[in-house]
């Protein structure tokens, strides 16, 4: 038998290794090979006839060379478990065990990378599609682990893999802009931790001053509009006063110059 346990990535093909030697040229009509998972038979070779099921296959062409391995195609989580191979040759019988572990590497995404100044903001790190359930997820800021992040309970997917979210919430100030935030994930299916990071963008840093400037500008415009209205009103009154001061002829009398 090969080393135990054997690990396979979800959806991949795997070969459960097995080999034997009998000390003489092998006569296949005297050979029996059976494979079972948890007591349930999955494949066998009897009287030179292989019997396998669906995604499970033996290697009958390799048996004469002492290769009794079992192949699994498109591995699913249901394939995980303890396998037993039973080999009988003439009067000799051998039974060995092998553990198959199925893994699925996690993926991660960070949908939010900016926040408004002086506003409570939540930054979720979504981790999904991993198996087994054990996983380590951490938020870091400038290389330091943030211990007050909130972790959700793992949720199981229809294919048996898991999802979870680690959320960090805080209220940024203008000085937090440019800080490097990153989410790190460690899992048995990963050769090295998975990570994704970003420099924080803090928006609305001058919102208060912008509002004040806008208010001052509106106030100035109103004062200017009022001053202009008063000026125009005074100009109209001045023009009317000039007209009233011009002498008029008395009513009913006509003024004329005597003729010579």
Image: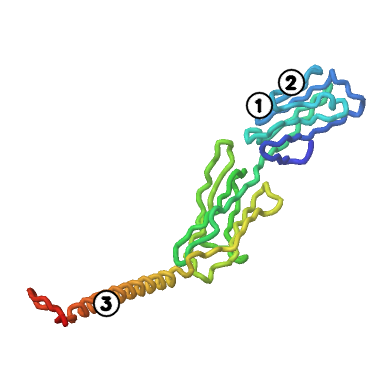
Q: CA distance from mark 1 to mark 2?
A: 14 Å
* Residue 218 percent location from the top left of the image: 36, 70
Determine whether 129 is above or below 116 in the image: above
Crowdedness near tag 1: few (<14), some (14–19) or many (≥20) residues, C-alpha within 10 Å: few
Give the residue at the far front of this rendering: 260
The secondary structure type at the circle numbered 1 is strand
Q: Residue 88 vs residue 179: left or right? A: right
Disc sitting over residue 171 in the figure: none
* C-beta proximity under 8 Å, tags 3 and 1: no
Crowdedness near tag 3: few (<14), some (14–19) or many (≥20) residues, C-alpha within 10 Å: few
Q: Quadrant of the C terminus?
A: bottom left
Which residue is under mark 2?
51
* Residue 258 percent location from the top left of the image: 14, 81
The secondary structure type at the circle numbered 2 is strand
* C-beta proximity under 8 Å, tags 3 and 2: no
Q: CA distance from mark 3 to mark 1?
A: 107 Å
Q: Quadrant of the N terminus?
A: top right
Sequence-first tag of 3 and 2: 2
Which residue is under mark 3?
235
| Mark nearer the viewer, 3 or 1 | 3
Which residue is under mark 1?
40
The quadrant holding residue 67 is top right
Q: Residue at x 69, y 40 (%)?
A: 9
């Amino acid at each position: 038998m090969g080393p135990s346990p054997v690990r396979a990535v979800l959806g991949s093909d795997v070969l459960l290794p097995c080999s034997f030697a009998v000390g003489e040229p092998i006569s296949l009509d005297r050979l029996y090979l059976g494979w079972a998972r948890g007591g349930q038979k999955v494949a066998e070779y009897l009287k030179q006839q292989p019997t396998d099921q669906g995604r499970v296959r033996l290697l009958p062409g390799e048996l004469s060379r002492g290769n009794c391995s079992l192949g699994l195609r498109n591995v699913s989580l249901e394939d995980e478990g303890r396998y037993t191979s039973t080999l009988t040759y003439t009067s000799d019988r051998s039974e060995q065990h092998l553990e198959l572990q199925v893994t699925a590497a996690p993926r991660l995404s960070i949908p939010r990378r900016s926040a408004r100044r002086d506003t409570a903001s939540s930054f979720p790190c979504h981790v999904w599609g991993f198996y087994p359930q054990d996983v380590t997820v951490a938020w870091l800021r400038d290389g330091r682990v943030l211990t007050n992040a909130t972790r959700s309970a793992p949720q199981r997917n229809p294919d048996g893999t898991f999802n979870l979210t680690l959320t960090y919430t805080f209220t940024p100030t203008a000085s937090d802009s440019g800080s490097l935030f990153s989410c790190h994930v460690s899992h048995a299916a990963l050769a090295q931790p998975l990570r994704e990071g970003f420099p924080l963008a803090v928006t609305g840093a001058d919102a208060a001053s912008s509002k004040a400037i806008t208010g001052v500008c509106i106030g100035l415009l109103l004062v200017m509009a009022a001053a202009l209205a008063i000026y125009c009103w005074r100009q109209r009154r001045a023009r009317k006063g000039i007209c009233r001061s011009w002498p008029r002829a008395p009513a009913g009398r006509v003024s004329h110059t005597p003729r010579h």
